[in-house]
Image: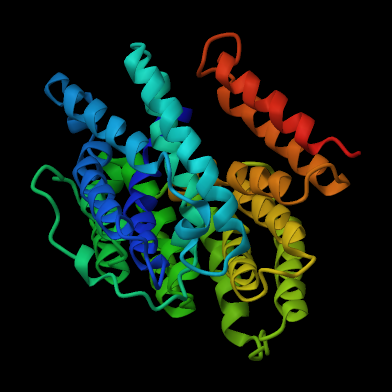
Amino acid sequence: MFLSKLKRILPKCLMVLIVFNLLAAKAPEPDWGARMNELRSVLSELLPDVISDQQYNSPKNFERIEKNTKKLTALTHDMPEEKMAGNNDASITLISGLFKDQILLAYGHLQNGHREYARSILKAVPRYCIACHTRSASSLDLSSLQKEVPKVLQTSLEKAEFFDATWQFDRALDEFQKILTDPQNVKDHELEWQRAAYYAIATSVRVKRDPERAMTIVNLILNSTEAPQFVEREARQWQISLEQWKSEEPKDLTTANALLNEAERLIGLASQLQEYQHNHSANILYLRATSCLHDFLSSYPDSPDVTKALLLLGNCYEALQVPELWNVHELYYEACIHKSPHTDISQTCYERYEQSVFFGYSGSAGVSLPSAVKKHLKELKKLSTPS
């Protein structure tokens, strides 16, 4: 289950990372633009292979997948992290360095024949650029990526994920709504229907920041007579949270303190609603909190509270666990450790990270952690231990 959930993440940010890279430097070095174009080309070819189960598991595509992964290692090897940021978000520069390491690790396992473990790493690569994806308020020109769906992507969910990956959010929401509207989907494709519901809520709240659009999604869920009982119960709480959001007085969120305070307020309310770890009743509140925290990181990258914001983002995404954000909380815990090493807060981030890794690999990777994961944990533990 862990690997199947991770699979859903890769399309979410591979294309988005390239966009930020292409727009990053005002005065690029001579080979920077050419390298970014080539990186974009490689990821464009990889995107359909990763979205489609049939494409990824077909032996005829193995060589192409390994070739593209090798290209990624070469293209990212000498990338300076400061050029990969593309905006002022304090977490992105930290994340960019981690991104390069993971691609190299994935390629090593592909070469050694460990396809499943290599796949789990490759699918998780977007954790290192999901920060870009979640900064939904930016006004970047992504028209060059807004094209029609590749023919190999056949299902409505695959099409919706492609649109979401290429920042065509309105088209993605339209596809998600088609899935939710068709009563046959909830009967015959229950898991796809559930993923579409969670995707649609995340996109309408975190990306579009539109309670009315989110309410449309909730009503589609509640109007389905075949919806799983737990999803229906969650949707009723989403309905309440959205009504409360719509009734709130507009807030002035133009200062660092205002953004951080609002995020903490929303997280506090969310923690009271979430009854157990995998309960999604508080998703609306957590998604709204992530918007505030990303705005904080973007607007105030030099604030002394950046590390605190990274920890809070980790907490939010760990609670959310929606398909497109699966495991992204580890990204922020790790960024927190690198941002303020040898401090009490970095130790807290390491403990949350370590627990998440152990939980994630239990039942999916034999009886022990892979040696590379153990080594990485050891390095992070050393870095986080207070002086």
Place of residue 252 in the rendered image (x, y in percent of width and height, measured from the top left): 68, 90
Query: Does residue 103 appear left or right of residue 67 in this picture?
Result: right
Choose between 59 and 84: the one closer to the eye. Answer: 84
Image quadrant in which the N terminus is located: top left
Residue 294 x %, y %:
59, 67
Query: Does residue 1 show up?
Result: no
**Occupied quadrant, residue 347:** top right
22 to the left or right of 344 = left
Task: State the residue at coordinates (38%, 48%).
Answer: 195
Viewer-closest of 328 and 227? 328
Coordinates of residue 338 in the picture (x, y in percent) = 69, 45
Q: Residue furthest top?
A: 367
Compared with 16, 301 (above or below) is below
Question: In the image, 57: left or right of 373?
Answer: left
Q: Residue furthest front?
A: 30
Residue at the image position 23 percent from the left and 56 percent from the top: 182
**Residue depicted at x 50% and y 19%:** 364
